[in-house]
Amino acid sequence: MSTPTIEKEPASKVELPAGVGGGEIPSFDITLKVRRYNPEVSDEAHWDEWQLTMYGTDRVLDALHKVKWEHDGSVSFRRSCAHGVCGSDAMRINGRNRLACKTLLKDLDTSKPILVEPIKGLPVEKDLIVDMEPFFQSYREIMPFLITKGHEPTRERLQSAEDRERYDDTTKCILCAACTSSCPVFWTDGQYFGPAAIVNAHRFIFDSRDDAGDMRLEILNDKEGVWRCRTTFNCSEACPRGIQVTKAISEVKQAILTRKI
Amino acid sequence: MAVPTVESPRSGRVSPAYSRTRSSRGNFEMGAWLFMRLSGVVLVVMIFVHLWTSLVAGDGISQVDFGFVAGKWASPVWQVWDLVLLWLAMLHGTNGVRTIINDYAEKNSTRMWLKGVLYTATVVIILLGTLVIFTFDPCPVIDGVAHVASYCPTA
């Protein structure tokens, strides 16, 4: 039995009369101050500011888009997915490392200018874009891939739920560099491996399927390795994925200690 | 025929300021980290016993003079106690300042100079302190003049 089908417009195309549908989104005015730097024009960085009318659902990234699309197309920043997964748009917002795409404007103090700067400790290339190579160099050094011994199994490498749980927290890293660039030890000279590299080492060191934990511990037992961590918790505070970074670092410290003693 | 290779697009791009020049794979930093924690625990106990015996027990702070110190150091227990306290406190403090220098000095040459001053001061203070603990004389004779206190044997 078939029901007569009536051609209906999809819901998204139906024009709603005013006053029907979702509630009115509150709007407010903000001042956005962005740290600008363009080495082709000047060696000096400076602040630019814009007055914007934004909505309660808007994030800092939306404000940056509004500036770039409607006011000044030369404002440069990285963003890819714009939904807190790709880790491209870490920046210093009101002095704290945040993802611009996860920070709602309404959660900030909109009575004062909102300050947006590039993350610290890495060389600025232009405006909010920094050179991430030193960050990824440390990441590569800890060998962030599965290393196994023995024969290749014919099926997938199985793991118990408990073994998986052991390193679950550190699998969440999106390599946005918010932690490493919030670390005062990294700011000094950029030699420290940094929280992100240690978190990603932790992810494999405590993986029961991986056989190169000792190698990674040896790498992180360096002068610039885990022992430079001062447990200031800046990294845990900065992580947009809520990873307990300082805890992961101290677990790596303990693993090195128990291995040596 | 040589196989043409494509260079990694990122090769050689890391700013030399960030590259770790030489890796030290010794266990010194681990030892220093462990020493800080262990000596810290021991120091908390030793320092409070030291403060209590010197400042609270007996007549309190008014009892402290050369004679009191000499009396304490007549016992080998207090000699060893103060010796361990001196060494632990000095090494603990020096290691702390060493990490502060590492964290705050940005150039290796600055680090070297600051640590040079630090280590010199540490060695001088530890050696002087150790010497005093074992050779302390509460009734010194300086330039032929005996500085006699009430507790000194009269000549």
Image (tube, coloured by chain):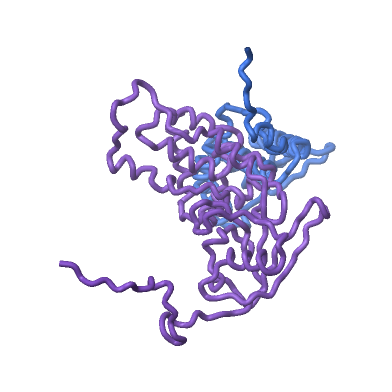
Chain colours: A purple, B blue
Residue B45 drawn at (x, y percent): 49, 47
At x 49%, y 36%, the residue is A144
The picture places residue B89, in percent across and down from the top left corner, at 60, 42
Report the side of B47 relative to B119 (left or right): left
Q: In this view, does A166 lie above or below A28?
A: above
Q: Can residue B56 be seen in this view?
A: yes
Q: Quadrant of the N terminus of chain A?
A: bottom left
Residue A97 in the image: state x and y as whole percent.
Answer: 59, 57
Residue B92 or A128: which is nearer the viewer?
A128
Residue A234, picture quadrant: bottom right
Q: Residue at x 70, y 34 (%)?
A: B123
- Image quarter where the C terminus of chain A lies is top left
Q: In this view, does B138 lie to the left or right of A234?
A: right
Which residue is the extreme one toward the top?
B1
Residue drawn at point x = 61 percent, y = 42 percent: A135
The quadrant where residue B109 appears:
top right
Residue at (69, 42) in percent of width and height: A189
Q: Residue furthest bottom?
A: A19
Tell me which corner region of the image, top left, top right, bottom left or bottom right, holds residue A47.
Answer: bottom right
The answer to whether residue B35 is left or right of residue B9 is: left
Most extreme residue toward the left is A1
Q: Nearer the viewer, residue A56 or A22?
A: A22
> Residue B53's x, y, as percent?
54, 50
Residue B74 visible in the displayed image: no
